[in-house]
Image (spheres, grey):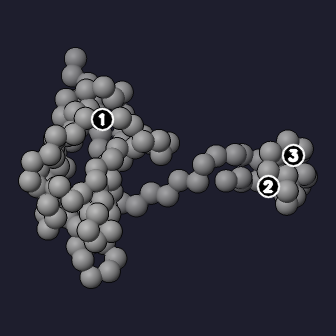
Amino acid sequence: YIRYEDGLEGLEAGNNALTDLSGVYDLSNSISVTRNEGDSATCSGEGKLKFIVFPIPASRFVNVIIKNVRSEGSVVKIYDIAGNMVNVRTYQRRNFIRIDVRNLRQGVYVLSVLDEKTGYSMKKRIVVRRRY
């Protein structure tokens, strides 16, 4: 993603390295933010994927209760604010998933749940905060 003002020179098709730019510009990754109100949301299509995440903020574990889906058929991933997937240990039992966040730095993350059977997915923001 590139944002620029009038007078940018060197921005041409094929110049993928953007090495010859001259002018005022800013490079960054495109970030899309979707805010879901409440503790559940409806996905597009006929099906629904609902889950509850607690506690927020979390210091040791994040608990996820998935509704309308068995946890064995769901994939849970956590991403940092830049969109990079982070490694966490998950413990699943029926519709309850416990995620160990003790190895994560303090900050904001995105928790993604995918229902492998229907293909529906949903994301929620989580906050990791250390207790002092």
Q: Which mark is residue 5?
A: 2
Could you tell me if residue 25 is visible in this image? yes
Separation (CA) of disc 1 from disc 2: 41 Å
Residue tagged by mark 1?
88
**The residue under label 2 is which amino acid type?**
Glu
Which residue lies at the image location 17% right of the left edge and 55% below the top edge?
72
- Label 3 to label 2: alpha-carbon separation: 12 Å
Q: How many marks?
A: 3
Q: With 81 as the anchor, is 69 left or right in this view?
A: left
- Sequence-first tag of 1 and 3: 3
Q: Which residue is painted at 64% across and 46% down in the image?
A: 28
Q: Tell me the crowding category of disc 3: few under 14, some 14 to 19, or many 20 or more residues within 10 angstroms, Cα based.
A: some
| Lateral position of residue 23 relative to residue 73, left or right | right
Residue found at the very far bottom of the displayed protein: 46
The dot on residue 47 is none
Of labels 3 and 2, earlier in sequence is 2
Judge the density around disc 2: few (<14), some (14-19), many (≥20) Cα neighbours within 10 Å. few
At x 91%, y 52%, the residue is 9
For residue 31, above or below residue 68: above
* 48 sits to left or right of 121: left
Q: Position of residue 46 (x, y in %)?
A: 27, 82
Q: Residue furthest toward the left?
A: 94
Q: Amino acid at mark 3?
A: Leu
Secondary structure under badge 1?
loop
Which residue position is annotated with label 3?
21
Asked if disc 3 and disc 2 are in contact, CB closer than 8 Å, the reply is no
The amino acid type, in three-letter code, at marker 1 is: Val
